[in-house]
Amino acid sequence: MNDSSSAADLVETLRREWERYPGGEKLPSSRALMERYRVSPVTVSRAIGALAAEGLVVSRPGAGVFRAERRVTHAVAGDVSWQEVTLGAHDALAEPRADAGGLLATLTLPPADVVDLGSGYPHASLLPERALADALTRAARRPEAWGRPPVEGLTELRSWFARQVGGPEAGLSAADVLITAGGQAALTTALRALAPSGAPVLVESPTYPGILAAARAAGLRPFPVPVDGDGLRTDLLADAFAVTGARLLVCQPLFQNPTGATLAADRRGEVLRLARAAGAFVVEDDYARLLVHADAPALPRPLAADDPDGVVVHVRSLTKAASPSLRIAALTARGPAFERLRATQTVDSFFVPRPLQEATLALVSSPAWPRHLRALSAALQERRTTLGAALARHLPDLPPAPLAPGGYLAWLRLPPGTDERALAASAFRAGVAVTPGAPYFAAEPPAPHLRLSHAAAVSPPQLADGVSRLAAAWPA
């Protein structure tokens, strides 16, 4: 075992070896374990901590680590069949029910020998892990770091988000920003706060499954509005508002998930005009603005930056560009809507933990943050190029997938009659994880699709290998 071995590997090794120790016997010292397994002190400390959390060992300061006393327990098998009746009654009454199936497909980590072309998070090698560690260290040293933050979030962090979203001339301030625990939490808060249970909500078709899951869990009825290469089809949006009476639209104008489309310039003002005429809010999920590629043209401003009237409720998250565990995002809103958002979040979770907010502020205020974004931008461009070349080489008969100069997605339209779920299962057996397209539609899909991600693979060569494996799994 060498220095790069993970604490998890060491835990498995020690768990097997220490089974032979009787209860109460002292185990080898940390130094002995470091020498025997050729690992760092941090790895040994984490492994011991994991075993202690499992109740297998007991650490006694100044004395050492000891094998815990063995206790024989007999688990009693309970009868949970009553839950079927209770939960079934909820369904019969059409109560809101969370369905995370579409989300779990992209959140579940595949085995190490499977190439990940499904996850929505960049690989760890693309993330600023050292800068995050430094930021956490600096934040932890602040005397006030563990105090209670304002419900709305730290004023300095809210001001930073206001500048990022609105720009220098849009007039957004800290008073218009609510810090949330990640983008999904922001979407959930917005949907619950801005529409009553049972109301219709307009969504893009296809759209991010997290939007559909959050809407349905809030008791809302998603109504699809098609997307084309120029983003949301505004010619159909007016009809959708008229037919449904919806007072809420959720959209991703920049590098839309899963199609990668960016809302065309002539449609941006039309979305705001139609929403204002309908008396509707627009929830703008700006998830990919920090995932722009190095060769991308200048990005359009957020819809929120061109909206002085409070029509747009803007969602901006740092999670994908920084770390899956940096659950920090912002909701930007003007007028009474902000009070609704704040009240909903307060009831749900009070506030976002202050240490996480302090660490985020330290991260985005450091010189390492713009350096990281430049490096991420270059890496994503390389991966997009690699994915495009691999698709052209290994799957030349498929219609070319648009590959946007931002985000991390390829939306593959499959031949009519293709069983996308069976294909995804076959691909997984061949050693590559991909995502079926059906969960991205609020209604029946017009065609079978697969969604590929080029951000989660270990490297561009592994990304190309994943496409090769997908082609090998393709039915004849």
Image (spheres, grey):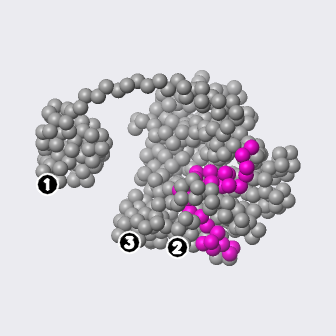
Q: Residue sitting at 40 percent across and 65 percent down?
A: 146
Mark 1 closeness class: few <14, some 14–19, many ≥20 residues within 10 Å: few
Q: Amino acid at mark 1?
A: Gly
Q: Report whether residue 54 is seen.
A: yes
Q: Amino acid at mark 2?
A: Glu
* Residue 85: x %, y % from top left: 60, 26
Residue topped by disc 1: 62
Q: Is residue 266 left or right of residue 383?
A: right
* Residue 452: x %, y % from top left: 57, 41
Q: Which residues are magenta?
A: 170-198
Q: Which mark is residue 169?
A: none
Task: Please identify the quadrant where the C terminus is shown.
Answer: top right
Q: Is residue 471 above or below residue 253?
A: above
Residue topped by disc 3: 142
Per the image, label 3 sits on a secondary structure element best described as loop
Say whether marks 3 and 2 touch (CB < 8 Å). no
Q: Which mark is residue 156?
A: 2
Q: Which mark is first along the chain, 3 or 1?
A: 1
Q: Residue sitting at 35 percent across and 26 percent down?
A: 75
Q: Amino acid at mark 3?
A: Arg
Q: Which mark is first along the chain, 2 or 1?
A: 1
Q: Is residue 389 left or right of residue 194?
A: left
